[in-house]
């Protein structure tokens, strides 16, 4: 910005401050006038946009005539320009309706209906001190569905605000009547790997999204965002009572977001459902994302994998070289044989590349993504895999040193493609705020895992990988905002406490963990949870808080198009009965129905195989033993099914008898109602095979 412009801004700022004081002294709080309204297609939701006497823009949301989101303001604070908060008038507003159905290349359901009404409201600064010639403007766009809504800001190309340096967003969410919240802290030392808090809504601090609320009347609302591209993640901060505001993940230096107009923000989303189950049934997040930008993605293969992995977390083998090195040629061949014998498409091998010595958490610069340890013959292992029809799954742990990874990205991906690798698990182990970028001038920047720098980094990796027909699965990632629709090679990610916490977590994942995840983290998209540890024992004998049947349920409940069978081959050999379910269960679905559930208590889900007429059902409970009722209304009329049921055995309990399991067969047809007993910390899994 040149000196004259700076002076002008300062002058304007002082002027505005004067106006502010005048307002505060002379005028009573001003009443808002409604300027635009839009309803959802079936008139379930209504969004009203208002502008008050100070020119402050707000919105509110009603559901079936009852207020859900009270008057909530919109706006921005800029680093080098007066904020967008007051003095706006509407220029015009337009509405539009859309109803289309699109097909997912893979997913929880094959066809997704996108039916919404859109409202665009153009707003311009209207009052002194802004002469018409320099008045700035923005547009807010609402897309309103029957099960939720999204809204985003568009910054048009304009001389008065070309380079946009955002200090923070002023977007509010006044969740009237919010009673209970399920949330994890944002801006803390860890990224997303926290146990979920269940607190009164008035006790939320600063949370990552999705945050799930239950209102006093039983309504459920989840706040999240969609299409987080070249922007900082939105955290949700409680201001007072049940009024929340967006706050953006910080940047190492300067404004939290730096963009050049024209551009638009991610969508701020609200899923609103009568029952908890309805939150998960909503396709809002995907619908708010752009269509597939990659064209033919038949090379993205949903599949199950095994790997040299659990032993590393048990510390019986190591990532680094030495006597306990896990990634040896011989061990890799053993896993490839196991994968080939049991129908797994790929084998993840962690610790194959140079750089894991000593304190790897802190030394991302030592990783080499093209050089293998001497006791791991990469070419020979890949060739052996190919001879058995098994691919390697790549592994690139970066310890959060993103720019170091980018400096080797092309070479690393080229090598992977040449070896026939179809998917790469990446990793960003570093404390939150500890992702690193070394600038060309030698300055090291420490960024948040979900700031604008990392949002750019992840898309760079995903798009570079797509050019080589490789899928990406980041751990310690940026949160999911539905970008898998646009980039279907972004198959999964971690972004919550996964199975590894049962190995060494203190405490391990509690019995309610899956029932929490399902209604919070899983609303964002697929998770590489790495399920299925049937041995139920972590490092130094640490006990899981799960029964064996619940490990099977995870495959149906916790969706991902890539699912690991995370346990050691020798452990699967000890439990051939339950292991059969892991071999049978698909990872790609034609349809998904949430049958029942309460956040943090229990959930039952049915999913139909994408490749057959078979259905699968999974159910999990928390620490409370229950009898879960399932209604098989979703089955096809007239069709007979053979059900293979894997359920907690008599006396099963995560603490005293976790391995007790009953595996039984019975016939099923549409309309049947079953009660499945589940133990404390337990669950069940069912395969419903359609008979000819
Ligand atoms: C953390 C990941 O979640 C885990 O799966 C992986 O084994 C380690 N980082 C090492 O990359
Ligand atoms: Ca992790």
Image (cartoon, rainbow, N blue to C red):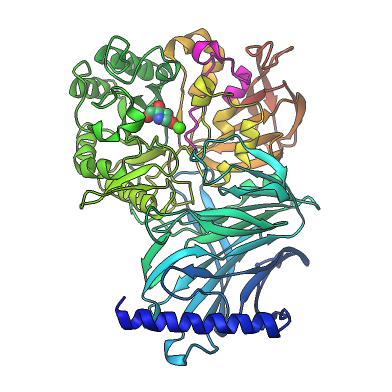
Residue drawn at (37%, 45%) of the image: 489
Q: Nearer the viewer, residue 687 or 507?
A: 507
Query: Eyeballing the image, is 291 above or below 553?
Result: below
Residue 539 location in percent, x, y?
49, 14
Q: Nearer the viewer, residue 152 or 188?
A: 188
Q: Nearer the viewer, residue 243 or 589?
A: 243
Query: Eyeballing the image, is 15 above or below 638?
Result: below
> Which residue is situated farthest in the bottom direction here?
132
Residue 544 location in percent, x, y?
59, 18
Q: Quadrant of the N terminus?
A: bottom left
Residue drawn at (26%, 49%) of the image: 443
Residue 372 location in percent, x, y?
21, 24
- Per the rendered image, the range of residues in magenta is 527-552
Residue drawn at (39%, 70%) of the image: 164
Residue 468 location in percent, x, y?
25, 44
Query: Eyeballing the image, is 198 above or below 482?
Result: above
Q: Quadrant of the C terminus?
A: top right
Q: Nearer the viewer, residue 346 or 529?
A: 529
Residue drawn at (35%, 19%) of the image: 340
Query: Would residue 147 appear left or right of 384 to someone viewing this image?
Result: right
Ligand 2 quarter of the rendering: top left
As for residue 95 lying within the magenta part, the answer is: no
State the predominant SS element of the stretch in magenta.
Answer: loop
As for residue 531 lying within the magenta part, the answer is: yes
Q: Quadrant of residue 239?
A: bottom right
Let me know if residue 141 appears in the view.
yes
């Amino acid at each position: 910005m040149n000196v004259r412009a700076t002076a002008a801004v300062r002058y304007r700022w002082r002027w505005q401050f004067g106006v502010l004081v005048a307002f505060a002294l002379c005028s009573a709080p001003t009443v808002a006038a409604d300027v635009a309204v839009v309803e959802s297609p079936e008139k379930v939701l209504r969004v009203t946009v208002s502008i008050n006497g100070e020119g402050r823009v707000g919105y509110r949301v009603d559901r079936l005539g009852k207020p859900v989101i009270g008057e909530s303001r919109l706006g921005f604070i800029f680093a080098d320009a007066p904020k967008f908060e007051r003095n706006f008038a509407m220029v015009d507003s337009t509405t539009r309706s859309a109803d289309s159905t699109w097909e997912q290349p893979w997913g929880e359901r094959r066809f997704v209906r996108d039916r919404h009404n859109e409202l665009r409201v153009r707003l311009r600064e209207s009052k002194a001190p802004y002469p018409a010639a320099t008045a700035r403007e923005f547009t807010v766009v609402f897309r309103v569905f029957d099960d939720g809504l999204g809204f985003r800001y568009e910054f048009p190309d304009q001389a008065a605000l070309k380079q946009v340096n955002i200090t923070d967003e002023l977007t509010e969410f006044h969740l009237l009547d919010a009673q209970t919240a399920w949330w994890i802290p944002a801006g803390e030392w860890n990224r997303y790997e926290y146990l979920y808090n269940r607190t009164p809504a008035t006790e939320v601090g600063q949370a990552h999204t999705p945050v799930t609320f239950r209102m006093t009347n039983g309504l459920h609302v989840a706040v999240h965002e969609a299409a987080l591209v070249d922007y900082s993640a939105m955290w949700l901060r409680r201001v007072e009572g049940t009024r929340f505001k967006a706050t953006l993940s910080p940047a190492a230096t300067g404004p939290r977001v730096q963009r050049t107009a024209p551009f638009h923000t991610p969508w701020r989303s609200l899923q609103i459902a009568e029952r908890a189950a309805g939150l998960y049934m909503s396709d809002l997040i995907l619908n708010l994302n752009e269509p597939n930008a990659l064209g033919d993605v038949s090379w993205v293969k949903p599949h199950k994998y095994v790997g040299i992995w659990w032993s590393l977390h048990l510390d019986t083998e190591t990532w680094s070289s030495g006597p306990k090195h896990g990634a040896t040629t011989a061990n890799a061949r053993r896993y490839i044989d196991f994968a080939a014998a049991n129908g797994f498409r790929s084998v993840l091998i962690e610790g194959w590349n140079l750089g894991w010595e000593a304190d790897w958490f802190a030394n991302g610069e030592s990783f080499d993504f093209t050089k293998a340890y001497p006791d791991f013959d990469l070419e020979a292992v890949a060739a052996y895999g190919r001879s058995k029809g098994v691919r390697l799954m790549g592994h690139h742990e970066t310890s959060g040193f993103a720019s170091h990874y980018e400096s080797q990205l092309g070479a690393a991906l080229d090598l992977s493609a040449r070896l026939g690798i179809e998917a790469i698990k990446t990793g960003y182990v570093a404390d939150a705020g500890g992702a690193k970028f070394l600038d060309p001038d030698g300055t090291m920047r420490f960024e948040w895992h979900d700031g604008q720098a990392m949002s750019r980094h992840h898309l760079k990796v995903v798009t570079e990988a797509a050019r080589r027909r490789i899928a990406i699965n980041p751990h310690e990632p940026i949160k999911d905002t539905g970008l898998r629709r646009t980039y279907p090679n972004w198959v999964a990610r971690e972004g919550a406490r996964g199975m590894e916490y049962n190995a060494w977590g203190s405490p391990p994942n509690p019995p309610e963990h899956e029932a929490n995840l399902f209604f919070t983290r899983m609303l964002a998209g697929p998770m590489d949870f790495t399920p299925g540890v049937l041995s139920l024992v972590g490092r130094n004998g640490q006990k899981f808080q799960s029964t064996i049947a619940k490990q099977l349920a995870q495959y149906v409940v916790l969706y991902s198009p890539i699912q690991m069978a995370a346990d050691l081959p020798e452990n699967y050999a000890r439990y051939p009965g339950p292991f059969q379910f892991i071999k049978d269960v698909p990872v790609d679905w034609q349809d998904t129905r949430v049958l029942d559930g309460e956040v943090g208590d229990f959930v039952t889900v049915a999913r139909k195989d994408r490749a057959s007429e078979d259905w699968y059902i999974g159910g999990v409970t928390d620490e409370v033993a229950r009898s879960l009722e399932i209604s098989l209304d979703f089955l096809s009329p007239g069709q007979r099914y053979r059900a293979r049921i894997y359920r907690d055995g008599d006396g099963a309990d995560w603490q005293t008898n976790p391995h007790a399991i009953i595996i039984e067969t019975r016939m099923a047809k549409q309309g049947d109602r079953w009660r499945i007993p589940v133990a404390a910390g337990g669950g069940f899994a069912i395969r419903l095979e359609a008979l000819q």
